[in-house]
Amino acid sequence: MSAEICSTCGLPKEICVCEDLGRETTVLTVGMDTRRYGKAVTVVRGLEANVDEAEKLARDLKKALATGGSGKAGVIVLQGDHRKEAARILADKGYRVQTA
Ligand SMILES: [Zn+2]
């Protein structure tokens, strides 16, 4: 068994808290936008520096909210107005969330 080492702190990933700390200091903004034909979309910003995380979160949110969307370039876009639910899910995951 080989332990994975965190590239940030050098500790084994099992005991590393870098990701948790990152979440606590990352403030996500959950807002709403309207697209073509006046369709509402929920937009989550704040992960522009963490594109992989945004894509992963977009998948989680789409599944949890049973809606379509994307997580391109660190901005999560979900079809429909899911601000409340999205904010709650993100807060449950340990993020600091602001609603715009
Ligand atoms: Zn670490």
Image (cartoon, helix red, strand yellow):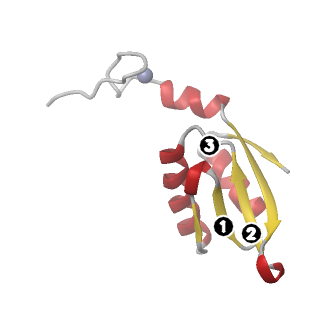
Where is 43 relative to 81, above or below? above
Q: Residues within 10 Å of mark 3 (few under 14, many from 20)?
A: many
Left or right placement of residue 15 versus residue 98 in this view: left
**Mark pair 2, 1: CA separation:** 5 Å
**Helix, strand or loop under label 3:** loop
Check disc 2 and give the amino acid type. Val
Q: Quadrant of residue 31?
A: bottom right
Circle 1 SS class:
strand
User: Percent x, y for residue 47?
Assistant: 62, 43
Residue picked out by circle 1:
78
Query: What residue does disc 3 label?
Result: 47
Q: Earlier in the sequence, mark 3 or mark 2?
A: 2
Looking at the image, do the residues carrying marks 2 and 1 touch, with CB atoms under 8 Å apart?
A: yes
Q: Is residue 24 above or below residue 35?
A: above
User: Which quadrant, please, contains the N terminus?
Assistant: top left
Residue type marked 1: Leu
Residues at marks 1 and 3, CA–CA distance in whole angstroms: 15 Å
Mark 1 touches mark 3? (CB < 8 Å): no
Which label's residue is closer to the chain start, 2 or 1? 2
Which residue is at the front of the view, 20 or 6? 6
Q: Taking 99 as reference, is 70 above or below it?
A: below
Q: Residue at x 63, y 47 (%)?
A: 92
**Pointer 2 local density, CA inside 10 Å: few below 14, some 14–19, many at least 20:** many
- Identify residue type, mark 3: Leu
